[in-house]
Image: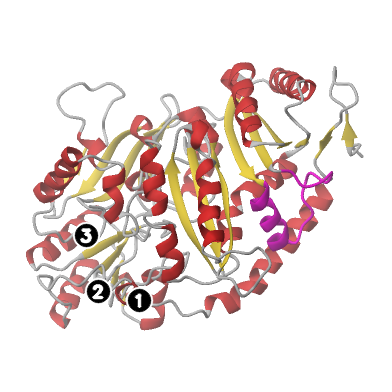
């Protein structure tokens, strides 16, 4: 049996502990899963107000859009030729009408689940000709209300377009339907020695097409870059039913405009992505994960600089979490924190991945030894096997669920210069305390706390304001204050989750007037009737 402690070579007086034993971790995670099942029932019965009611002062239904009637439904039945391809039952519709945070709720009376690109084309052409508004929906894991209706828009679910089309094990080019679940795509690639160049906590639910439509960044952008670089081609159905197809794109094609880029991050506003061609790197053979405790945000940046310098080509993720997020995680998961020596202001999760474990182990141990000798790291642990590796990652990946566990969460996914990044969390907490709205333990206060975590490697902060209820009072304190603060620091109001419904009115804090007019011009050109995901984006 492995010792629970080991000292790094060359580090005197300081021990870096390995994670708890596999059996203990497995037992803890099983208990965690059981608790999630136990608490899901009462939370799921919570009634969510219609978006149209909650934000009635900001948005109203455009009467140019036709309301669904029996003739429309019969046409869609003729296209899909499958009664399971249409959902009209009120209880079943609820799943598609609500976002996973239970903040937004639409009033769609129909979900369509096409199985082919041709069916999507025929559906969109009919909707365009008849001014029926639509909302494309993938795994519905978005954070800004972009994948659910605002009013009675028809939902077009891509979940039945879920086939791997082809994979080239020489070039690493994967071609897949848009509805393939990200985790399934990655498992398919793993079986062939490759890895999907994007990873995120919602990988078990989100769709390949959805992450492209929102230009998701994820946990390993530091290593593999953004989807603007890895996506080689797309198949997209335009609002009039025209099928744009660049799925056979090469890595080099310098003939004319790179049209696929228009749809990466377009959030279903100018077309529905039905197929993705993406370049996938070879799967690393060796992974290491270390979780470190540090004393300040400034120290987080110093550790990051050292990691980039010393770990270089094997550094695949560098995540940070503030101490408050870990307190909430420990309370919600009802597990002991992996670092047992005390509570710390900040934590850093480092992942390395490469082809030679001995080489990677030596580089990581040397880096950690130097960091501890320099007094940058107060304590830390290294995963000893795959189960422990997953356990350490769970303390980061569980945070979206953790921060919503008290009742609700206001999520701000933003980009900022690294020096200013955590300052937004402090500023938000100050505003909430001044308004007498926040207290970690006082159940009478609507806000639990504002916490911060995210991807240091690409300057992406997740400011999560954990609440016991959603309320206008909270929202008025936070908005537009948060966006004004970001604009002053020359940041972006959306780093990786898009604009959706939540941030439509705040795009001006990140884009100038010329940029906004160009975006509106593209929308008007490709969707002149405005049927695609209305009331959102711009």
Residue, disc 3: 119
Front position among marks 3 and 1? 1
Q: Residue at x 61, y 75 (%)?
A: 444
Q: How far across and how far down the image is residue 231, in percent? A: 34, 34
Residue, disc 2: 152
The Cα atoms of the two marked residues, 2 and 3, are separated by 21 Å
Residue 251 placement, left or right of 470:
left
Nearest to N terminus: mark 1 or mark 2: 1
Looking at the rendering, the stretch of residues picked out in magenta corresponds to: 323-344
Sort mark 3 into few (<14), some (14-19) or many (20+) by Cα contacts within 10 Å: some
Residue 198 visible here: yes
Nearest to N terminus: mark 3 or mark 1: 1
Colouring used for the render: secondary structure
Quick one: SS at disc 1? loop
Q: Residue at x 14, y 65 (%)?
A: 127
Residue 476 placement, left or right of 350:
left
Residue 490 placement, left or right of 398:
left
Q: How far across and how far down the image is residue 109, in percent? A: 28, 78
Is residue 11 covered in magenta?
A: no
Is residue 329 covered in magenta?
A: yes
Nearest to N terminus: mark 2 or mark 3: 3
């Amino acid at each position: 049996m492995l010792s629970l402690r080991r000292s790094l070579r060359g580090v005197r007086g300081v021990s870096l502990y390995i994670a708890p034993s596999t059996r203990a971790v497995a037992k803890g995670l099983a208990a965690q899963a059981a608790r999630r099942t136990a608490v899901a029932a009462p939370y799921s019965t919570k009634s969510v107000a219609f978006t149209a009611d909650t934000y009635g002062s900001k948005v109203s239904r455009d009467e140019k859009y036709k309301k669904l009637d029996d003739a429309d439904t019969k046409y869609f039945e003729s296209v899909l030729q499958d009664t399971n391809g249409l959902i009209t039952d009120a209880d079943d519709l609820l799943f598609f009408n609500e976002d996973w945070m239970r903040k937004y709720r639409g009033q769609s009376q129909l979900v369509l689940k096409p199985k082919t690109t041709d069916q999507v084309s025929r559906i969109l052409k009919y909707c365009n000709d008849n001014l029926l508004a639509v909302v494309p929906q993938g795994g519905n894991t978005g954070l800004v209300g972009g994948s659910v209706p605002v009013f009675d828009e028809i939902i077009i679910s891509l979940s039945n377009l879920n086939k791997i089309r082809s994979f080239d094990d020489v070039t690493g080019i994967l071609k897949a339907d848009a509805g393939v679940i990200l985790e399934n795509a990655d498992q398919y690639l793993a079986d062939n020695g490759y890895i999907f160049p994007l990873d995120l906590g919602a990988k078990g639910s989100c769709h390949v097409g959805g992450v492209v439509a929102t230009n998701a960044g994820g946990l390993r952008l530091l290593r593999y870059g953004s989807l603007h670089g890895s996506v080689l081609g797309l198949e997209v159905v335009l609002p009039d039913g025209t099928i744009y197809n660049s799925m056979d794109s090469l890595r080099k094609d310098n003939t004319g405009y790179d049209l696929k880029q228009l749809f990466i991050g377009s959030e279903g506003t100018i077309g529905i992505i039905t197929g993705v061609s993406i370049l996938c790197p070879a799967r690393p053979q060796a992974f290491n994960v270390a979780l470190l405790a540090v004393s300040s945000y400034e120290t987080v940046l110093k550790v990051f600089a050292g990691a980039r310098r010393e770990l270089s080509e094997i550094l695949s993720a560098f995540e940070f979490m503030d101490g408050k997020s870990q307190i909430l995680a420990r309370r919600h998961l009802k597990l002991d924190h992996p670092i047992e020596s005390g509570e710390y202001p900040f934590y850093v999760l480092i992942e390395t991945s490469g082809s030679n474990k001995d080489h990677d182990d030596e580089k990581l141990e040397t880096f950690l030894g130097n960091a501890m000798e320099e007094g940058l790291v107060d304590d830390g642990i290294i995963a000893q096997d795959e189960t422990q590796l997953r356990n350490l990652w769970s303390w980061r990946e569980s945070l979206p669920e953790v921060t919503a566990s008290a009742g609700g969460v206001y999520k701000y996914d933003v980009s900022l210069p690294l020096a200013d990044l955590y300052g937004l969390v402090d500023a938000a907490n100050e505003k909430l305390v001044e308004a007498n709205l926040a207290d970690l333990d006082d159940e009478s206060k609507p806000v639990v706390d504002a916490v911060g975590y995210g991807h240091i490697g690409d300057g992406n902060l997740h400011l999560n304001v954990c609440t016991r209820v959603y309320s206008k009072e909270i929202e008025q304190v936070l908005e537009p204050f948060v966006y004004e603060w970001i604009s002053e620091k020359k940041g972006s109001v959306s780093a990786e989750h898009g604009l959706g419904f939540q941030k439509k009115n705040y795009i001006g804090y990140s884009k100038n007037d010329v940029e906004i007019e160009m975006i509106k011009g593209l929308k008007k050109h490709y969707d002149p009737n405005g049927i695609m995901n209305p009331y959102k984006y711009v």
